[in-house]
Image (tube, rainbow, N blue to C red):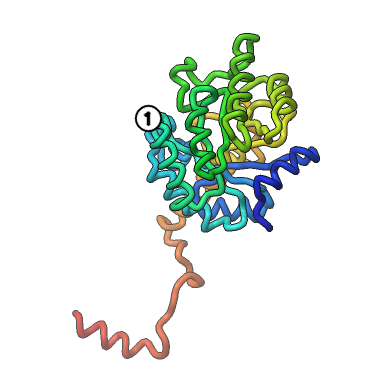
Amino acid sequence: MKKKTIQDLMKMKETGEKITWITAYDAPFAAFTEQAGIEMILVGDSLGMVDLGYDSTIPVTMDDCISHCKSVRRGAPNTFVVGDMPFGSYQISVEKAVENAVRFLKEGEVDAIKLEGGKSVTKQIRAIREAGILVCGHIGLTPQSSGVLGGHKAQGRTVESARAVIEDALAVQEAGASFLLVEAVPPEVTAFIAKKLTIPVLSIGAGKECDGQLTIFADTIGLFQAFTPKFVKKYCDLAPVIVDAYKQYAKEIKEGVFPGEEHVYHVIGDIAPFEELFKEFE
């Protein structure tokens, strides 16, 4: 599979071909993604909840993200990878935002970075883009600032809120973002934004009337058990399958069934010399 470029993604918007996007945090699942032909991977700060056991994305660090980006790139060398800038990596200053975006490219080997926010982060978007780095904006429900939003609540459901979301979308594009993620926004609002903007607009829980979709891989295949967002469709439910396999593994150990004869390596030749060897240590 040939890696997509931003020009390819723009062409897909123009022709109406939907863009496929999913998260991955390590080499094995990145490899599965590439084998499936999905065009983009997001190494999201959601790794904090999915992989690291945190109850939010806030504790995730730059070093966490860079490490996982490296792993994903090793697993999916031919996929367009987006690194997600964690909380605190771009809010402090424009200079810090550029420095950390550069780290994502130099150390994490990503193709673009994503950061949350609309009008409030246009200076960072502009500076990162001027540094020669592709930027994905993220508006609507922005988990890093969910406290200000009153929790993980859908946005744009009133006229006043929808106006703010649309203004954020326009500001992000004007600042130089190359594509945009819209989260937990009514499909009518997302459809308007996708038609209004010239850059690709992708949805996570924001309807299908846009240029593509993103989902969290662990939700999609039933690995994350804490909760399931309303907008998630499970294509399989692996968690109970894995638990059942582990239970059977433990049971067979207890009962002496595993390992079986087919799982062991035998000595080469006659056992007698080995028995003499063992006697030396008695």
Snapshot quadrant of residue 174:
top right
Residue 44 seen in the figure: no
273 shown above or below 47: below
Residue appearing at x 69%, y 28% in the figure: 197
Residue 30, position as x, y percentages in the image = 56, 52
Snapshot quadrant of residue 95:
top left
Three-letter amino acid code at the position of disc 1: Ile
Residue 15, position as x, y percentages in the image = 80, 40
Q: Nearer the viewer, residue 144 or 278?
A: 144
| Residue position for label 1 | 92
Residue 9, position as x, y percentages in the image = 69, 43
Residue 155, position as x, y percentages in the image = 59, 18
Q: Nearer the viewer, residue 6 or 32?
A: 6
Circle 1 Cα neighbour tier, 10 Å, few/some/many (<14 / 14–19 / ≥20): few
251 shown above or below 261: above
Residue 264 seen in the figure: yes
Picture mark count: 1
The image quadrant where one finds the C terminus is bottom left
Q: Secondary structure at mark 1?
A: loop
Residue appearing at x 46%, y 62% in the figure: 258
253 shown above or below 140: below
Snapshot quadrant of residue 202:
top right
The image quadrant where one finds the N terminus is bottom right
- Tell me if 153 is positioned left or right of 281 in this view: right
**Looking at this rendering, what residue extends furthest in the right direction?**
15
Q: Nearer the viewer, residue 149 or 115?
A: 115
Residue appearing at x 50%, y 51% in the figure: 26
